[in-house]
Amino acid sequence: MGEKVVAGPIGLSDRQRYRAKLQQCLAGLARLLAEKRFDRPKNLMGLEIELNLAGPDGMPRMMNAQVLERIASRDFQTELAMFNLEVNIAPHRLGGRVFDRLAEELRTSLAYAHRKANEVDAGIVMIGILPTLARDDLVSANLSDVDRYTLLNDQIVAARGEDFALDIDGVERLSCTSASIAPEAACTSVQLHLQVTPGRFADVWNAAQAVAAVQVAIGANSPFLFGRELWRESRPPLFLQSTDTRPPELQAQGVRPRTWFGERWISSAYDLFEENLRFFPPLLPICDEEDPQSVLDEGGIPRLAELVLHNGTIYRWNRPVYGIDDGVPHLRVENRVLPAGPTVTDVIANAAFYYGLVRALAEETRPVWNRLPFEAAAANFDHACRYGIDARMEWPRRGRYGGTTRVPAVQLVRDELLPLAAAGLDAWGVEPADRDLYLGVIEERCKRGVNGASWQSRTFHRALESGMGRDAALAATTKRYCELMHLGEPVHTWPVGLPEPAVPLR
């Protein structure tokens, strides 16, 4: 959502003109692909993390403008609501001790931001959904004062034509409505970017789709919303429902939601951009003056601004990205499935597991997507969101007989996927010390059956058992989470429950 968009009236002709420009952009993309104009392999990866602001009481703080003013760094940006920030880490080349370098950069950046936030009685919290958020926090008045967000909210609300219905049935059930897209701001995630050549794009995207469920199962960190315990990773259903432009009648007709897992394996990056134009009406029909074909005729590289803007309003869990760097176009897979947190070590471990696993699966001679129905991958994703580290996956059998079987996610990771991830990191040239350290974190989570969501849930229930009310228990759990997050040891080592109160000396 980083595009510079200026709010203004949108007329009927604007949408027709924008649709025509989208088709010109798509034709420009096809020509760039046919003429092989894209960047050569650079093994580049990038990282973005969405963050929450909370006070010492664990409650959200609506003050990202004040905090950003104090941070005064282009690495930090606004996000959808006033209690959100985003930190962007510059692209790194995969190899060597890249993950240790990333961890150090993140720790330095977050510690600095946390100190600056402390100056206004706030702090940085890296978590999928802040447990202390209330319905009154997620209203349009608390959206960040940025034209793009205002316009996006107005257009999604207008497209839907009625309140958004939030209905998530998990450990408990949440059923309510919202007059704006503000509940989407509760979802704070990690986005992992991988630059790929057009020839490798489909294999990498298919591999990322196949393992999205496993990523969620071991990385879930969002069990609470509005005081209710829901799915272990409640972000995906919340994101889907809070941005859903379809009234119930269109849902019943099978119209696709803008927050979308997809419905098929692909053979080209072009497939995804073409689907985006074919299935989804424009939300922000703002036209650029560029003529992509003329730019190409003159030997230049078109920005494809309308295509890029439209792509940013379709929330695939693995999103295709077109970009230009130093005058050369490139493609990226943006992996959006993971929640933020719990610690820097956990975030980097999740990243190492993903980059290693995607590399290995994309290069297999019998690709997993030829052996796993796409519908099974989508069902795995839903199951992982519901059950987290206790989820079971449908996965291709090993050996000559083929078919699929159901297996606990932790068993699948330990027996099959961690060795693949290690081989993938070796192929990237990552040093064994980095590989073993961060994949070891994933292995320990699986051995102990612990991730951020399970820790939050167990600690919350311990607090209830001690006699606390629900709101007090959620606040105490959040405060304890923040303490342990800033100490930095990975979540599988965290003691469950709240610390015993100190006994005063007599």
Image (tube, rainbow, N blue to C red):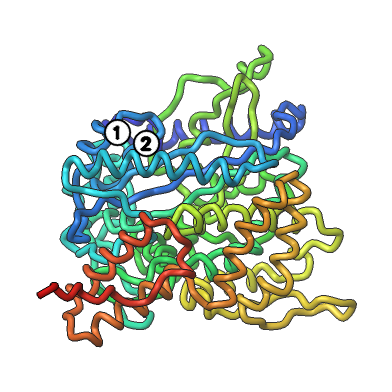
| Quadrant assignment for the N terminus | top left
The spot of residue 244 in percent (x, y) is 38, 59
The answer to whether residue 33 is left or right of residue 102 is right
Label 1: state its secondary structure: helix
The spot of residue 317 in percent (x, y) is 53, 56
Q: Earlier in the sequence, mark 2 or mark 1?
A: 1
The answer to whether residue 376 is left or right of residue 486 is right
User: In the depicted view, which residue is nearer to us: 33 or 325?
Assistant: 325
- Give the numbered dot on residue 71: 1
User: In the depicted view, which residue is nearer to us: 244 or 175?
Assistant: 175
The spot of residue 40 in percent (x, y) is 74, 30
- Residue furthest top in the image: 298
The answer to whether residue 363 is left or right of residue 305 is right
- Residue furthest front in the image: 506
| Quadrant assignment for the C terminus | bottom left
From the viewer's perspective, is residue 354 above or below residue 303? Answer: below
Label 2: state its secondary structure: strand
Going by the numbered disc 1, the residue's amino acid type is: Ile
| Res 9 visible | no
The spot of residue 443 in percent (x, y) is 62, 69
The answer to whether residue 172 is left or right of residue 95 is left
Going by the numbered disc 2, the residue's amino acid type is: Phe
From the viewer's perspective, is residue 92 above or below residue 494? Answer: above
**Disc 2 marks which residue?**
76
Local packing at callout 2 (Cα closer than 10 Å; few below 14, some 14-19, many 20+) is many
> Which residue is located at x 30 percent, y 82 percent?
461
* Callout 2–callout 1 Cβ contact below 8 Å: yes
From the viewer's perspective, is residue 78 above or below residue 231? Answer: above
> Which residue is located at x 37 percent, y 58 percent?
485
- Residue furthest left in the image: 506
